[in-house]
Amino acid sequence: MIDLTNIIKVITPAIIAFTIGIAITPLLTRHLYTHRAWKKKPGKQTLSGAEAVEFNRLHKEREREVPRMGGIVIWASAIVTILGTWALSLIWPTDITVKMDFLSRTQTWIPLFALLVGAIVGLANDILDIYHSGNGLSLRRRLFVVITTSIFIGWWFYAKLDITTVGIPFGQPLEIGWLIIPYFVIVSLALYASGIIDGIDGLAGGVFAMIFSAYAVIALTQDQIDLAAFSAMLVGAILAFLWFNIPPARFFMTETGTMALTFVLATIAFMTDSLGEGIGIAVLPIIGFLLVATVASTIIQELSKRFLGKKVFRIAPLHHHFEAIGWPSTKVAMRYWVLGAIFAFFGVILALVG
């Protein structure tokens, strides 16, 4: 039976992060609009360099007036929350403040590190995208950061936390030894690619909130209370962002948000696996099915155009296809929220019984 005090410890950071996010957003919004923090060359290009006609028809004009870097709300409120509770436990050590501190070497150091790396590199990309080259950091440089940082985190799992197995549903953990390092790199790259789900007002925020809620529950049932609190904190921070990103969006999440969230999601999935005697990795494709569908639709589209000479979807990724066939963007976002909740629910059930 889960201790009530642990539930309070998990929920409290979510409330704090949400409150901080709501409080700082007016200041951030004023800054972004004052400094015209939107793309100076709106629209997108295909991988071949040609104009993305369908996408630009749907979104080009919208991109002219809405600031980017809204993801700052998420990671800034999260960082203030976790460091604030830690500092309070040091400055004013009581039973309550010490209990509420969830910054721990074994459970939250690495997720926090992943969040910071993704946030900083994503922010650099957004700044360049807005004020300098117009194209952000090159994909090669971003992938280099993802790969090198993933190698380090994978090594930390292997060498420092002794993680050498992967949980198998309804079976014994699979021993893979040092291969846990490249495995983490592959999962991180796949999740990073799914960041393109940030393409419709309210879509990415709702989907990520469902995913991290699921992992908060999984970590809580594994008695990884600090990790559960960290995941719940992210939910609160995301919901604060979503409050202002619901159509019509006040700002877009962009790379500083998606890179931070996908990077930390990979870390949390691994930490709720063999470390928590669970199957956190195996349920990731279920809990994050909409992320999988987003990447898969893009891959299918590119392969079909290259080898068959035709498109499978009007436009990829999948959520833009629904827009192109006539669905209002609000309908797409809300149906993704519904599906996100369904997949998160079934993923949690499998994690608990598997």
Image (spheres, rainbow, N blue to C red):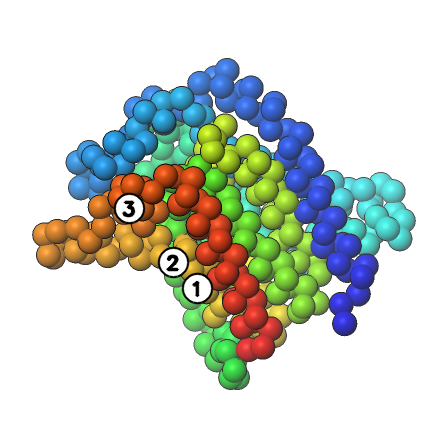
Q: Are marks 3 and 2 in contact (CB under 8 Å)?
A: no
**Which type of secondary structure does the marked residue at label 2 adopt?**
helix
In the displayed structure, 303 sits above or below 33; it is below
- Identify residue for label 3: 321
Which percent across, then down, holds residue 279? 54, 72
Residue type at the position of mark 3:
His
Give the CA distance from mark 1 to mark 3: 21 Å
Residue type at the position of mark 2:
Val
Crowding at dot 1, Cα within 10 Å, few <14 / some 14-19 / many 20+, comes out as: some
Labels 2 and 1: the sequence-earlier one: 1
- Identify residue for label 2: 292
Which percent across, then down, holds residue 123? 47, 34
Q: Nearer the viewer, residue 316 or 28?
A: 316
Q: Nearer the viewer, residue 332 or 123?
A: 332
Q: Residue furthest left?
A: 309
Task: Tell me which residue sits at (41%, 34%) in the image.
Answer: 125
**Which type of secondary structure does the marked residue at label 1 adopt?**
helix
Q: Are marks 2 and 1 in contact (CB under 8 Å)?
A: yes
Q: Nearer the viewer, residue 273 or 322?
A: 322
Q: Quadrant of the N terminus?
A: bottom right
Task: Tell me which residue sits at (31%, 46%) in the image.
Answer: 322
Q: Which mark is residue 285?
A: 1
Q: Is residue 300 left or right of residue 100?
A: left
Which percent across, then down, holds residue 251? 48, 29
